[in-house]
């Protein structure tokens, strides 16, 4: 354990699966006490089990990040449990398929409620604590917030909002000693992306994967652990001069 986050508490949303779970395990291995927040309490508890089995410290929180009261309660419980809060990783997100012509209003609203509003609500609840601690926030955007991805209209728009919000928060929060950066991952094989990959292959997952790989100069998809390492860097003192940065971790997808 190298302890790059020793003595700090991290609140990680969507930490019951995929990238969020990988980050929760990595942050705990680096010495952080981790609040594992997820809509699915059972999934959050599984992540906590993995962390505590490995000798780390974590609590599971069942929370819908699009609900202000639930977010406020979860942040307060974290502070009560661990005595403070220094790091927020706004990772939870949902996808939404379709172009503007065939995206339903419900899908649009859900996509914005979780990806954009959830980021705002968790940040708002955490900021008073981060302010006293000189903390850091990492927002999970996406390559879809930087370029147009076919049939992903609501998701592209919501992740674009996260990119803009990151810059706005960095400007507002710098005087308070809080750094805010965003990660734009390329495609990582997680439960979130499987339906999109299947749809891209006309129902055939392998065909969808092959089509997707054509967009990736590096010749493969990313892993949750690779994105978690970027989040660790942005939460650690190693990135102390970085705020308002939008970091693509995408195997060269947006370099073309
Ligand atoms: N996987 C990719 O290819 C990829 C690429 C770019 C960006 N991202 C972003 O990375 C983040 C994590 O994605 P992932 O691939 O690990 O997904 P995932 O589906 O494996 O995990 C997302 C987690 O978020 C939780 N969640 C969903 N809605 C929530 C809510 N309202 N409140 C609290 N938790 C909620 C889910 O229960 C799930 O455990 C998302 O923001 C996603 O948009 C993923």
Image: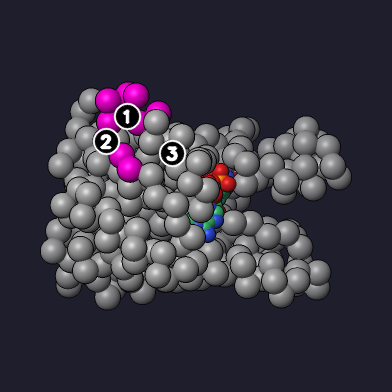
Q: Is residue 109 visible?
A: yes
Q: Residues within 10 Å of mark 2 (few under 14, many from 20)?
A: many
- Does the rendering let one see residue 141? no
- Assign a secondary structure to mark 1: helix
Q: What residue is shown with label 3?
A: 45
**In the rendered structure, which disc, 2 or 1, sits on the residue that comes first in sequence?**
1
Question: Which residue is painted at 59% across and 56% down in the image?
Answer: 94
Name the residue: 32% across, 29% down. 52
Q: State the separation of the CA atoms marked 2 and 1.
A: 6 Å
Query: Looking at the picture, does residue 114 appear above or below residue 84?
Result: below
Q: Position of residue 75 (x, y in %)?
A: 31, 59
Q: Could you tell me which secondary element the residue under label 2 belongs to?
A: strand
* Mark identifier at residue 52: 1
Give the percent coordinates (x, y) of residue 35.
33, 47
Q: Measured from the top left, where is residue 218 in percent x and y? A: 58, 35
Residue at the extreme right of the image, as rendered: 202
Q: Which mark is residue 57?
A: 2
Residue range corresponding to the magenta coloring = 50-59
Q: Is residue 224 left or right of residue 74?
A: right
| Mark 1 or mark 3, earlier in chain | 3
Looking at this view, is 198 or 181 the one in front? 198
């Amino acid at each position: 354990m190298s302890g790059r986050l020793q003595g700090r508490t991290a609140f990680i949303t969507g930490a019951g699966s995929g990238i969020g779970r990988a980050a929760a395990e990595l942050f705990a291995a680096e010495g952080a006490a981790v609040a594992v927040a997820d809509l699915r309490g059972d999934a959050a508890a599984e992540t906590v089990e993995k962390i505590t089995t490995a000798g780390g410290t974590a609590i599971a929180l069942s929370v819908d990040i699009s609900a202000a009261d639930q977010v406020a309660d979860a942040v307060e419980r974290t502070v009560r449990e661990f005595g403070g809060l220094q790091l927020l990783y706004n990772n939870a997100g949902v996808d939404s398929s379709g172009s503007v012509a065939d995206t339903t209003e419900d899908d649009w609203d859900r996509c914005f409620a979780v990806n954009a509003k959830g980021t705002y609500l968790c940040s708002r609840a955490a900021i008073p604590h981060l302010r006293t601690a000189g903390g850091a926030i990492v927002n999970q955007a996406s390559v879809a917030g930087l370029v147009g991805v076919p049939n992903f209209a609501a998701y592209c728009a919501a992740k674009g909002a996260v990119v803009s919000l990151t810059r706005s928060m960095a400007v507002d929060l710098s005087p308070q000693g809080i750094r805010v950066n965003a990660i734009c991952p390329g495609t990582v094989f997680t439960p979130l992306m499987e339906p999109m990959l299947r749809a891209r292959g006309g129902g055939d997952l392998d065909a969808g994967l092959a089509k997707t790989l054509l967009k990736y100069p590096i010749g493969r998809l990313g892993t949750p652990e690779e994105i978690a390492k970027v989040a660790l860097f942005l939460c650690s003192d190693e990135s102390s001069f970085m705020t308002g940065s939008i970091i693509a971790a995408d195997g060269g997808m947006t370099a073309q």
